[in-house]
Amino acid sequence: MTRGILTTCYATLSSGKATADKKGEGKLRQLYLDFYKDEPFVRIADSPPHTKHTWGNNLCLIYPLIDHRTGRLIVISCLDNLVKGAAGQAIQNMNLMLGLPEETGLQALAIYP
């Protein structure tokens, strides 16, 4: 792996909020889709992401699932920390502060050469 951050987070499901089955996993996925629907740089992935999927871009890929054996929530995410890190965050915040579209200057791949 040349660059990027791959994270796996675990949490206990709240009782009555989500069930540890396919139906609960579908509800969980929809919850994430709804929450991030207006975020231009967040994508809810259909399969576990790899750091190569975010190489040189400002995306954060998120893959939520439920471990049916343990009943735990697992969220896998990845980003390119050289773009989505401080530099990309600074540009994104500057765009918001100046009233520019949030994506300005962040859509081209940031790869040299």
Image (tube, rainbow, N blue to C red):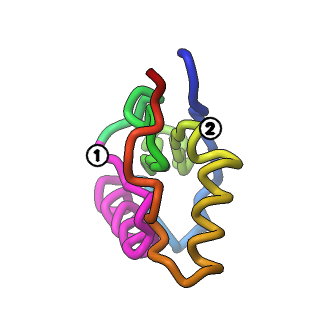
Task: Find residue 46 and name its label.
Answer: 1
Say what amino acid the circle numbered 1 marks: Asp
Residue drawn at (45%, 64%) of the image: 104
Q: In front: 40, or 105?
A: 105
Compared to residue 88, the image places residue 97 above or below, namely below
**SS type, badge 2:** loop
Magenta residues span 21-46
Residue drawn at (49%, 71%) of the image: 102
Q: Is residue 23 magenta?
A: yes
Q: Quadrant of residue 85?
A: top right
- The percent position of residue 10, horizontal first and vertical second, equals 63, 44
Q: Is residue 112 left or right of residue 89?
A: left
Task: Find residue 81 and name its label.
Answer: 2
- The percent position of residue 109, horizontal first and vertical second, equals 40, 39
**SS type, badge 1:** loop
Q: Which of marks 1 and 2 precedes in the sequence?
A: 1
Mark 2: give few (<14), some (14-19) or many (20+) Cα within 10 Å: many
Compared to residue 34, the image places residue 108 above or below, namely above
